[in-house]
Amino acid sequence: MNYYQIQTKFRDEIRPRFGVMRGREFLMKDAYSFHIDEADLVREYQNMRATYTRIFTRVGVEFRAVKADSGAIGGDRSEEFHVLANSGEDLLAVSDQSNYAANIEAAETRSLGTRAAASSEMREIVTPDQKSCEEVASFLGVPLKNVLKLLIYKDRRGFVFAVALRGDHTLNEVKLDKFLGSSAPAVRASDEDIKQVFQCEPGFLGPTNRSIPRVIADHAAAHLTDFICGANRTGYHLVGANWGRDAAEPETADLRNAIAGDPSPDGQGSLKLVRGIEVGHIFQLGQLYTNALKMTVLDADGREVTPEMGCYGIGVTRIVAAVIEQRNDDKGILWPDAIAPFRVLLCPIGTDKSAAAKAAAEKLYEDLLAAGVEVLLDDRGLRPGPMFADADLIGIPHRIVIGEKGLAQNQFEYKRRDAAAVEMIPATVDAVLERLQR
């Protein structure tokens, strides 16, 4: 691809889509490891974790390794590597005072300790048109966190149960399925199911209904005192309800998505939410697949053992898109040196009139190639304005301008793509190479 084709592609295809760039091709590096015991699996897992950390550090992006849900692949432990970007598909919870980081699916929330004693009597109020927690909180003029919501689910056997959450929290269904421990996920009951089982419109259910056979409450919901909930009668809610006195004590579990301001699970600081693009994932698979395949090997003593497995992947082409998502400005891309398509761009000025500028540019191009530097020569003969605009758009890290005026003073003009200042350096390849090392 020549310079004109590169410039056209970036101008017509990439620039209009800044913030949503995704590669059509997905190329991934996969690796698998097999181990005689768990200790050796953990050793190699940590080795691969450190390797991935070095790779993304060298690439030159801001990234985090986060605790993740292993999903369909399975295994006891996995971590994702995310390039941080506002346009990222994944929501991450990270501590503001430690290295704790987790995908929102795996971010833990902590039990809040002893619940306060009830301080008010339960009473019923009319809420004719208020079904959602937000509508009820607004109608009563109370914080949303004081309202309890009840979500009705059916397990794989068709049995109905309820999940209780604070009004300002959202259910994490990955956590719910893990708590239930079933290979078949629970499903939300339909409005018709709810009407048939509870003789009540959805939006008015509460845990005081003794006909609900099982209530599982998130830790924060189980910690509520004098809360507001549905009265199990269409058009009515209860205020001043309490666990133990008005509703049976529920099962408790970590069932919700973490939110900004939650205590960090490691006890250090609070959580903040950021977005990331997943570019790598590593797994400790254990014996999940080797057991399924009835795979055995002989250990050092000649005994048959089932080996442990690890799995490690990097999205090679996704890294390119993620770097552009994170490293750009209103002019174009800001390529880091390590993965830039070219490291240096040469911009000769006025070559149609100056043989000296043309010769100097061509010589510097050959000298940099001989020195092992990836260099691109813009030989289109454009005026400086359009040439520099294209240079900023493509985002090659280092730009050298060769012009007759500078050569008269034995100087090249140097500029880093991510810097505002322009520098004058001696017009020699050694001076250019020395400047590239800074």
Image (cartoon, rainbow, N blue to C red):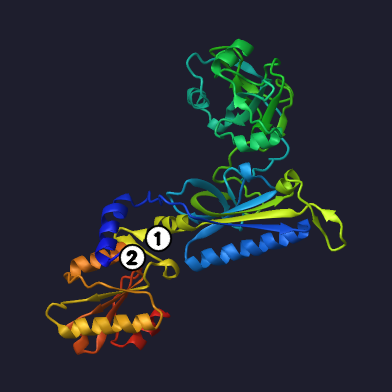
**Which residue corresponds to the image point at 44% horizontal and 56% vertical from the top-left?**
322
- Residue 236 picture location, percent across and down: 56, 14
**Which residue corresponds to the image point at 57% horizontal and 49% vertical from the top-left?**
271
- Residue 273 picture location, percent across and down: 52, 48
Q: Is residue 421 visible?
A: yes
Provide the secondary structure element on which disc 2 rests. loop
Quarter occupied by residue 149: top right
Pick the front one: 157 or 227: 157
Q: Is residue 116 visible?
A: no
Q: If you read the primary sequence from the N terminus, does the residue marked by circle 2 or circle 1 appear first? A: 1
Q: Which residue, given by chain and number where applicable, does mark 1 sit on?
A: 327
Proximity of marks 2 and 1: CB atoms separated by less than 8 Å: yes
Quick check: 45 left or right of 403? Answer: right
Provide the secondary structure element on which disc 1 rests. loop
Q: Which residue, given by chain and number where applicable, does mark 2 sit on?
A: 395
Inspect the image, locate mark 1, and give the three-letter code of the amino acid beneath it: Arg
